Amino acid sequence: MKSSILLIILFTCNSCYLIAQDTFRLAPPLLKYNAVFFVDENEVEIKFAESQTAVHYSLNNEEPTMQDPIYTKPIKIKDNFTTLKAKAFGNKFYSSETVGVTFIKDGKPIPSIEQTIPSPKYPGSGNNTLADNKGGIDQLSSNTWMGYNCDTVSISLNFGKQQKVNKVLLDFLQNESSWIFLPENILVNWFDKKTNSFQFFGSEKILSDNETTGSHCNHRVIETKNKIKTDKILINIIVQKNIPSWHPAKGEHAWMFIDEIKVY
């Protein structure tokens, strides 16, 4: 009798184990697009091959649910700062992790950009690197990034004629395991023709007190309350001089990677 009970218990446990093994988590979908930057519109494909599943997506920066649209054809992105998120769902599967990306529309034309010369190791993709609508790739191996290991990076934007503006966007790479940090500070000034001098536009200090894992594109927007009229903007980016104490390379000089600037 005891032997029979033991066999039943073992059979039941093994059955539970087999049922649990039948359920696994879906891999995340793959988002396919040329670049996160675009002029008029951008097109995004979502790749996912698992049968009996569906990919749901959102365009409002919210976590996708099964009530959101199902992906069936390429998605057209037309609005600035549109965040697309996608997630795979299926019967008998755990849903996948969410993947997402924010798409950034082109701003004012910038005929001329002058910047501090980047490191020869990371020269970017040419003289027009900061305004070519390429990039947004979270890999330091991408040739779209300009890499700097100096204290301050100066960038001068020349519009050729006066423009009304109130926002400046800069896109950075953040990959702290590779010593690539966000800058300590971003200072933006605009040229006032009336006084023939630069005036304060805006700034942002960035703290690196806590570790950020993985590799990410991180855009920052500096803006004014009211539009100003100018033909030139000067940006000074203060690079992290001492890597924080929590990092294995604490005290060393950090790298700063930038690939695009937009003005609105």
Image (cartoon, grey):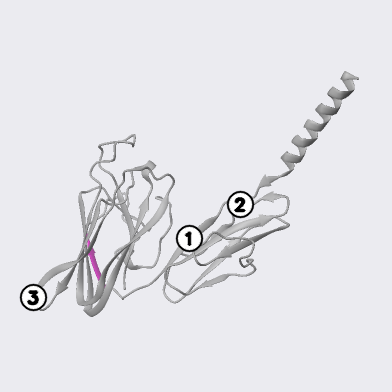
Amino acid type at image mark 3: Thr
Q: Residue at x 26, y 72 (%)?
A: 225
Give the CA separation, mark 1 to mark 2.
Answer: 16 Å
**Which circle marks residue 195 in the picture?**
3
Q: Which element is circle 3 on?
A: loop
Q: Residue at x 54, y 59 (%)?
A: 63
Residue ranking furthest to the right: 1
Horizontal side of 74 relative to 3 (left or right) equals left
Residue 113 falls inside the magenta stretch: yes
Decide whether the magenta segment is chiefly helix, strand or loop: strand
Give the CA separation, mark 3 to mark 2.
Answer: 57 Å
**Which circle marks residue 63 in the picture?**
none
Residue 160 location, x and y as percent? 22, 78
Q: Which residue is mark 1?
A: 101
Residue 113 figure quarter:
bottom left
- Residue 144 vs 239, above or below: the answer is below
Amino acid type at image mark 1: Val
Taking depth in this image into account, of 258 and 226 the one nearest to the observer is 226
| Other residues around mark 3 within 10 Å, as few (<14) / some (14–19) / many (≥20) | few
Q: Which element is circle 1 on?
A: strand
Q: Which residues are magenta?
A: 111-115
Q: Are marks 3 and 2 in contact (CB under 8 Å)?
A: no
Q: Quadrant of the N terminus?
A: top right
Q: Which residue is mark 2?
A: 96
| Other residues around mark 1 within 10 Å, as few (<14) / some (14–19) / many (≥20) | some
Residue 91 figure quarter:
bottom right
